[in-house]
Amino acid sequence: MKHKPADIIIDGLILFIMGIVGIMAVLPFVYVVVASLTPPELMGRGQMILIPKRLSFEAYRYVFSTKTLMQALRVSVLLTAVGTTFNIMMTVLFAYPLAHSGIKGRRIILFLVTFTMMFSGGIVPEYMIVRSLGLMNKMSALILPGAISTFNFVIFRNYFQELPKELEESAMLDGAGYLYILMRIILPISMPIIATFVVIYGVGIWNSWFAATLYLRDSTKWPIQVVLRMLTNLSMALGDTTAMDSDIMLPPVSTKMCTIVIATVPILAVYPFMQKYFTKGILLGSVKG
């Protein structure tokens, strides 16, 4: 198949533009990684380039010498795992029944749910509810208020509506109930969309920090994003300085960059394994309204 000169030029221009966009997307993270590995003396003098002359792990030694960061990292991992599991479970259990037209009061419930996509109560009512339920300074305050995302619920519900009704009907003829059908039939064939929203919920929980600053007073319960924000805005000493060489004064920038890398790498490590499900999972639930 022969290509016209105009097609070759257009293809080359598209590849050039996409290459520039790709570099612009990757360059900031490369800068952060290199800055975290730049020797402190070079960083202190502002002599940092994208390709360092030599590597230094002083910033990582400094950060990992404290219990603050490691405790925050453990909190974030536990919070993300428990919160994502709970979010997926609640969304599925809420969306699956409402995908059936025979449910009484279905239209009213759907109206009330979708109404929250346009109008929200705001921070103050949510704070008052959390306080009245006795969830202040508890990890559950970071999970329960956002247990179900309205947008994600709509996608799940649309997906369940598109599944062949013959699957449920044939199972019911064999005496299966709705819960058995959901666990043994619906969920196994719904793994693409579930995997998609595992990543969406997980990334959202991992990156959240505002709720923790509102509801958690105990610093040992802070997730890593709160610690990172403290580092960004304050001159906060995290590490044990005795773990460093006596003649090295670690600049705050190296500590911040190192903490950013530590806070970003875990979620980036999970993302590639789920990325292939994103397009398929979103499209499966967005065909019908």
Image (cartoon, rainbow, N blue to C red):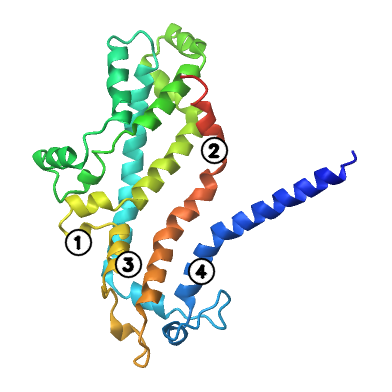
> Residue placed at 39% from the left, 17% from the top?
99
Q: Is residue 179 visible?
A: no
Disc 1 marks a residue whose amino acid type is Ser
The alpha-carbon separation of the residues under discs 2 and 4 comes to 29 Å
In percent of width and height, residue 282 lies at 50, 32
Measured Cα–Cα span from mark 4 to mark 1: 30 Å
* Closer to viewer: mark 3 or mark 2: 3
Q: Which mark is residue 232?
A: 3
Instruction: Check contact, mark 1 vs mark 2: CB within 8 A.
Output: no
Q: Quadrant of residue 229?
A: bottom left
Using residue 276 as the reference point, say whether residue 142 is left or right of it: left
Label 2 sits on residue:
277
Tag 2: amino acid: Tyr
Q: Residues within 10 Å of mark 2 (few under 14, many from 20)?
A: some
Q: Earlier in the sequence, mark 3 or mark 2?
A: 3
Q: Say whether disc 2 or disc 4 marks the residue closer to the N-terminus.
A: 4
First-in-chain label (3 vs 1):
1
Rendered location of residue 153, percent (x, y): 37, 28
Cα separation, mark 3 vs mark 2, equals 34 Å
- The residue identified by callout 1 is 219
The residue lying at 42 percent from left, 42 percent from top is 200
Give the amino acid type for the residue marked by disc 4 in the picture. Tyr
Precedes in sequence: disc 1 or disc 2: 1
Picture coordinates of residue 97 (x, y %)?
35, 18
**Residue count near mark 4 (Cα–Cα under 10 Å), binned few <14, some 14–19, many ≥20:** some
Q: Nearer the viewer, residue 45 or 34?
A: 45
